[in-house]
Amino acid sequence: MAKEKVLITGASGLVGGLTVEALGDRYEFTALNRRPVLEIPCIQADISDLGSIRPAFENVDKVLHLAAYTDDIHCPCGTRACDDCWDQTMAITVNGTVNVFRAAQEAGVSRVVFMSTGGTMNGYERDENSPYALISEGRFEEVPEVWPMATSDWAARPTSPYHVGKLFGEACARYFADNYDMSVIVIRLGNVSASDRPVTRRQFSGYLSHIDTTQMIDKCLSAPGNMRYRIFDAISENRWRWRDTAPAKQELGWIPTSSSDVFNYLKYDE
């Protein structure tokens, strides 16, 4: 049986590399990337230029859209975003995502898996003395026994231009799913690090391991074709998780096998 042909945008990033390595035996991957990608066939182009990216979508079954502007996360301006953060977010994350969906639709792509972020809900961590604030601050001894799990139905509360851009992408995904013969699945990704472990104490709640990441991507790429539009949170089985992963487990059969609980949070900065 022939492998499905899957185009990865932003394939040179961490998640793209993990996907190619873990799932290369299941899918025939190609890349759309600004920089060269040596592991798989690659078309070098900027997603902000619709005309230049169209050839990458020819004869493709599905798309895994990872490309986005992320440098605002490390910008000295912090959450009070500067002009450059907004300009780059609009050009790459917003306009680029529109272009990816337009090119996919024109080429007859059957599904786009859009990589969003759990950070679209980060504003709940700013509610003073809420369970989410206590967890975010690493004050685990003060957290109540149970707390409400945030679902995709809750109002989004982004805290950076990157999160705003991803929320736009979720709305764009809904539009194309509703108006064209295209299935779109959104993954609100947890904290994936190169070291495959939490980097700060704050990340103990949202930690997502490499193996759980690629399993989730596989489940979304291979989900039934009649799944028109869904948003799924992807977070490992962490004690301090506060976003709901039950829908992914129930509807996709995703079974996370990792947990931040194996790491000692007392060794991390608060």
Image (spheres, rainbow, N blue to C red):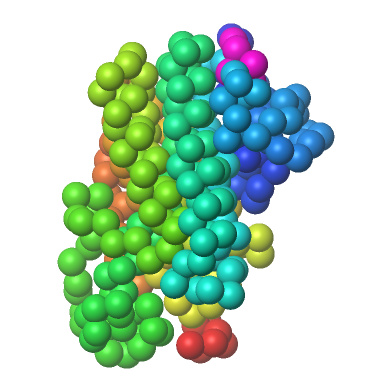
Tell me where residue 55 sits by quadrant. Answer: top right
Residue at image x 27%, y 70%? 124
253 relative position to 201: left or right: left
Q: Position of residue 51 (x, y in %)?
A: 60, 21
137 relative position to 52: left or right: left
Residue at image x 40%, y 70%? 205
225 relative position to 213: left or right: left
Q: Is residue 54 above or below residue 12?
A: above
Q: Residue furthest front?
A: 83
Q: Is residue 9 above or below residue 125?
A: above
Tell me where residue 147 sits by quadrant. Answer: bottom left
Q: Is residue 197 above or below residue 229?
A: below
Q: Which residues are magenta?
A: 55-59
Q: Quadrant of the N terminus?
A: top right
Q: Position of residue 67 (x, y in %)?
A: 57, 42
Q: Nearer the viewer, residue 23 or 30?
A: 30
**Number of numbered discs on residues:** 0
Residue at image x 43%, y 63%? 160
Q: Main secondary structure of the magenta part?
A: helix
Q: Position of residue 44 (x, y in %)?
A: 73, 30
Q: Evaluate whether residue 48 shows in this view.
A: yes
Q: Nearer the viewer, residue 163 or 82?
A: 82
| Residue 137 drawn in magenta | no
Q: Is residue 149 above or below residue 13?
A: below
Q: Evaluate whether residue 227 shows in this view.
A: no
Q: Nearer the viewer, residue 22 or 101?
A: 101
Residue at image x 44%, y 58%? 161
Q: Position of residue 126 (x, y in %)?
A: 30, 77
